[in-house]
Every structure is written in structure tokens, then in C-alpha cells.
Amino acid sequence: MVSTTPWRPTRRVNLGAAALTLAAACAIGAPAALAQGKPDVKIAIVASKTGPLEAYAKQTIVGFQMGLEYATGGTMAVAGRRLVVIEKDDQGKPDVGKAQLAAAYADDKVDIAVGPTASPVALAMLPVAEEYKKILLVEPAVADSITGDKWNRYIFRTGRNSSQDAISNAVALDKPGHVLATLAQDNAFGRDGVKAFKAAVKKGKFVHEEFVSPATTDFTAAFQRLIDKMKDQPGRKFVWVIWAGGNSPFDKFAELELQRRYGIEMATGGNILPAMVSYKKYPGMEGALYYYFGIPKNPVNEWLVANHYTKFKSPPDFFTAGGMSAAIAIVEALKKTGGDTNTNRLISTMAGMSFETPKGRMTFRKEDHQAMQDMYHFRIKVDPAFAWGVPELVREIKASEMDVPIQNKR
């Protein structure tokens, strides 16, 4: 089980972080001197810095910068080439994201791009990467089609896809005698997740899928339809919720007392810590998640947690880990190419490449460049030391346990 004691960096970790900071400070002039005669490596990060997913984007950007710091030992350079990050705001709009990526490739002359936050924006951006023949490392947009039927060879993804989310939750929830339904946003994120979840249910009984607008604020009608479909079903009943954004259905679920009145339990994946405050209303709630700072036990996560506490007086969040993973993947690829940013060489280097992240080892699958990664079956515990419901680790779901389909057509 993950500790429920408020996390504090150990003396050993703090000394290590201090040493790294000192080394970076001593090397301030080093990257410039080292990079004389060598062009900068330019990286664009396109994210929804404004709009409903602003919090996700900010975490991704923070994690990306920390990942570069970690992976370069504080020098922010690889093979004598300085790393320069250019931030772009897609505002959560597909047309804006498409234009921003094109400007990054054409005007800013970036070598690699990272992002975006939202799946609809990502789908608009994929053809731009192909047009300019430059890599787009997708983080954290999750729609399956990104590395599925809309994929091209320039697309890599460190973020989990909808199938990984859904299959890991099915591994956690799909048992004989269980009755399952879904409540999801009516967009690519929600529909891809439900499709994958339904396909992964083999042991229990799937009875209903409910889609609502991402802008929904009143979930009464949606829950009534779920009640009608589930209330008379024998067995243990779960509604698996797929949601992104602040207007989540969790409060309405508690208000309607579905578990007390009808035996219908809430289930979901992980989320950012502010969204998990509502999880406190569901002690014992289960599901599978992508990341929670207290679960992974590895040196990368230890560094991230310690340094995030030092810089921000708070733990790293869901998308912070994703941003860091993307940065580490890029630095690892550049180290292997000796700093060469030729796109074809980067593609051949990254396809099949393994790298360490706050979640442990990830590997870009050769067929579709999707990062294969472990997930975590959790159970919520209420602890007064935390403002949010604490996900206790039930067990690590290994990448090898999840039959994540290859869905691209190329």
C-alpha cells in the first residue's frame, strides 16, 4: 500500500538535489561555450495554456522543463547543443493548434514538437507533422485514433492512450458477477475510451453506455438513464466514468446516493489532485490510473517528487509526470543520435526505444510509436492529512498484461 503519511523529502534526496542544483549553477556558462558552432535544438511545446484544460497544460509544461533538467544533469544541452523550448498556446481549439504547430515548424524552425493537451487538437495537428516531415511527440492527448487510424510515421506518444486507460480499468473491474456501464464525454476522448473498455470486458456484463456533452453541468438525466438500466441487475454494479475538465459528475453521483439507494458504485481512473478532492466522497472506490506521485518507486520519480516539493511546495501531479516522460524521451533519443536532429534518424532511433520515466520504463512500440507502460490498480482511502482521496496501490498492472491493440493502418 502507498503511504498515507504526508510526503517529505529525505535528507539524502535533498542533498542530491542540492548537488544537482550546484552543478547546474556552476555549468551556467558551459552549454553556451560547449555549443559554439553548433545550432540549438529547438523544441516546441503546444498546449492549452488557456481554456478549460489550462491546469493540465501548465502541469505538462512544468514537467517537461523538469524532465529536461533531470535528463541533461542540469546543463540543458545534449551533445554540445543547447535545448531551447518554445511554448505555444492552442487555446484548446483544433484550428489554433494546427496553425501554431505549422508556425513552429515553418517560422520557428523547431526540430521536434510536443503536445497537445486535448485529443481534438491533436487530431488536427497530426497532418501538419506529416506535411513538414517533423516529429510530433504527443503528450498528453489520449484518443486512440492518434496512434490509430489517424497516425503517421512522424507521430510518437509518451502519454497513455484511451485503450491503455480502458483496458487497465477493465483489468481492475471486470470480474464474474460484475455489472458494468459507462458515463463519458461525447468526444473522441470519451468515445474511444468506452469502445476500448467494452472490448476489454470479458468476465462481467456490460449493460449501458451514456454519453453527454463535455459542457454538461446537470447530470441528473444521464444518471437516471443509468439507474433505469442497472437498478434491477443482479450482482455488483459499477459505472465507470471517463471525464476531463472541472465540471465532473462526481458530486451529482454522491448527491443522488446511487450506491445507498441502488447499489451502484462509482469507478474511474486517476485525475489531477484538485479533481480527486471529490474522490473523498467514495472511500473504497476502485479503478486504474496512469500516475499518482506516491505510488511508483524508482529513482526518476524520487527526483521528481523531491524537486517539485522544493520548487513548488507541493507534489507533482498527473500531467507533470507525463511532461517529464516526454522530455526524457527526447533527450534519450538525442543522446543516442549524438545530437543529430535529422528526422529519419530520430524516427529509426525512437521506434522501439526504451527509456526511464517517473512511472518506470516505457517503450515506444515499433508498429505505432505508442509508449507501452505500466498502470496502477488503486483503491481510494480517506486520510485527513490529504485534501484529496488517496489512491492506495492494489497492484501494478504490467504493460505485458494489457492487450493494447495496434490500430493504425499503415
Image (cartoon, rainbow, N blue to C red):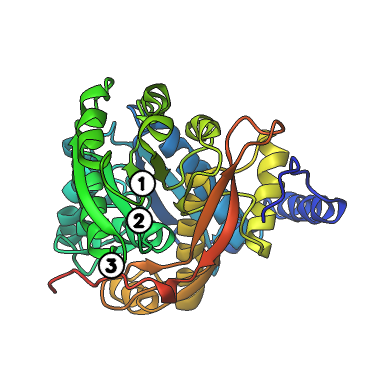
Comes first in the chain, label 2 or label 3:
2
Task: Indicate whether 5 appears above or below 281.
Answer: below
In the rendering, which numbered label is found on residue 21? none
Residue 52 lies, in percent from the top left, at 33, 28
Name the element at disc 1: strand
Q: Check the picture and name the quadrant holding the N terminus.
A: bottom right
Determine the residue positioned at 47% across, 65% down.
Answer: 329
Task: Indicate whether 45 appears above or below 252.
Answer: below
Determine the residue positioned at 32% across, 27% down.
Answer: 51
Image quarter of residue 86: top left
Residue 223 lies, in percent from the top left, at 26, 30
Q: Within 10 Å of the Cα at label 2, are there few (<14), some (14-19), or many (20+) other Cα atoms?
A: some
Work out how far the residue at label 2 is from the one at label 3, CA to CA, in angstroms.
11 Å
- For disc 3, the marked residue is 202
Name the element at disc 2: strand
| CB-based contact (under 8 Å), mark 1 and mark 2 | yes
Name the element at disc 3: loop
Is residue 221 shown left or right of residue 63?
left
- For disc 1, the marked residue is 238
Q: Which amino acid type is shown beneath numbered disc 1?
A: Phe
Work out how far the residue at label 1 is from the one at label 3, CA to CA, in angstroms.
15 Å
Q: Check the picture and name the quadrant holding the C terminus.
A: bottom left
Comes first in the chain, label 1 or label 2:
2
